[in-house]
Amino acid sequence: MIVILTGAGISQESGIATFRDSGGLWENESIEDVATPGGFARNPARVLDFYNQRRKQLLSPEIAPNAAHLALARLERESSEPVLVVTQNVDNLHECAGTSNLLHMHGELLKARCTACRGVSQWEVDMSKSDACPKCGTTGKLRPHIVWFEEMPLYMDEIEQALESCRLFVSIGTSGNVYPAAGFVRSARSAGAQTLELNLEKSVGASAFHDGRYGKASEIVPDWVDEVLSRQ
């Protein structure tokens, strides 16, 4: 199995702002105010407005999968061995490109979660405190289906099982700063997998990988996929 971890760097070329982009949505907001359970409890309207803006950006016509997303979807379709994409991104660009074996460990921007019934629903419009849950009908209990700081990422059991059994682990467009994802390379290596970093530049955890290639994701990811498929 090939396990691929993707981060903000793979979507940046599609116009999705990263945490660190100047002029991005995060620039004038503190993480504590808009990306923690405490921030939501203090001012839910502010948090909902922040994610409403992010949702509108994602759904704007100019946002589309780039060559890196498309290459990973091709790898899944044509590979002779299973491919699992684990993404830290909350956008839907992998799905739009055609990837289907996919785990969103940090949640999904186009979904809502009900804190009453824990149901998750597709949600592509603005969200407010007066909205009712599509699953149970309770009003005022919806929140973005996003894993905030201080919360546990999703699908950790499935991810750990994949890391223990994969032949190759590839990290694409990640900073190496955020755990537990930053530790996946060590889990894969300890299980005997080969490891590769594909990134714009070396991450803080680059030394943990067997190999690394650096440049724009839209260029280096398709090249790597071509190589993998040519060897199968």
Image: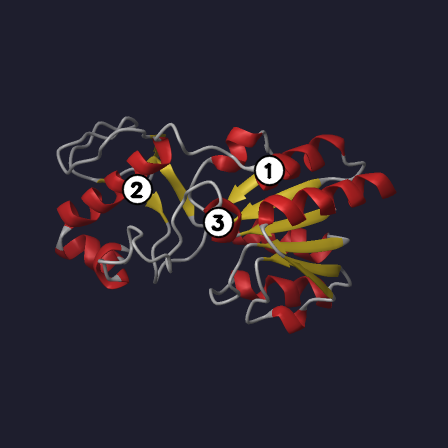
Q: Secondary structure at mark 3?
A: loop
Q: Quadrant of residue 56?
A: top left
Residue 219: mark in rendering: none
Q: Earlier in the sequence, mark 2 or mark 3?
A: 2
Q: CA distance from mark 2 to mark 3?
A: 18 Å
Q: CA distance from mark 1 to mark 3?
A: 22 Å
Q: Position of residue 129 (x, y in %)?
A: 14, 38
Name which residue lies at 46% across and 36% down. 92
Frontmost residue, 159 versus 169: 169
Q: Secondary structure at mark 2?
A: helix
Residue furthest right as drawn = 231
Q: Please indicate whether residue 171 sits to the left or right of residue 144 in the image.
A: right
Q: Which residue is mark 3?
A: 105
Q: Colour scheme of this structure image?
A: secondary structure
Name the mark nearer the viewer: 2 or 3: 2
Q: Amino acid at mark 1?
A: Ala
Q: Amino acid at mark 3?
A: Met
Image quarter where the C terminus lies is: top right
Name which residue lies at 46% across and 48% down. 12
Q: Which residue is mark 1?
A: 67
Q: Are marks 2 and 3 in contact (CB under 8 Å)?
A: no
Q: Amino acid at mark 2?
A: Arg
Q: Is residue 154 above or below residue 191?
A: above
Q: Is residue 143 visible?
A: no
Q: Secondary structure at mark 1?
A: helix
Frontmost residue, 31 versus 160: 31
Q: Position of residue 5 (x, y in %)?
A: 59, 52
Name the mark nearer the viewer: 1 or 3: 1
Q: Is residue 13 visible?
A: yes
Name the mark nearer the viewer: 1 or 2: 1
Q: Which residue is mark 2?
A: 54
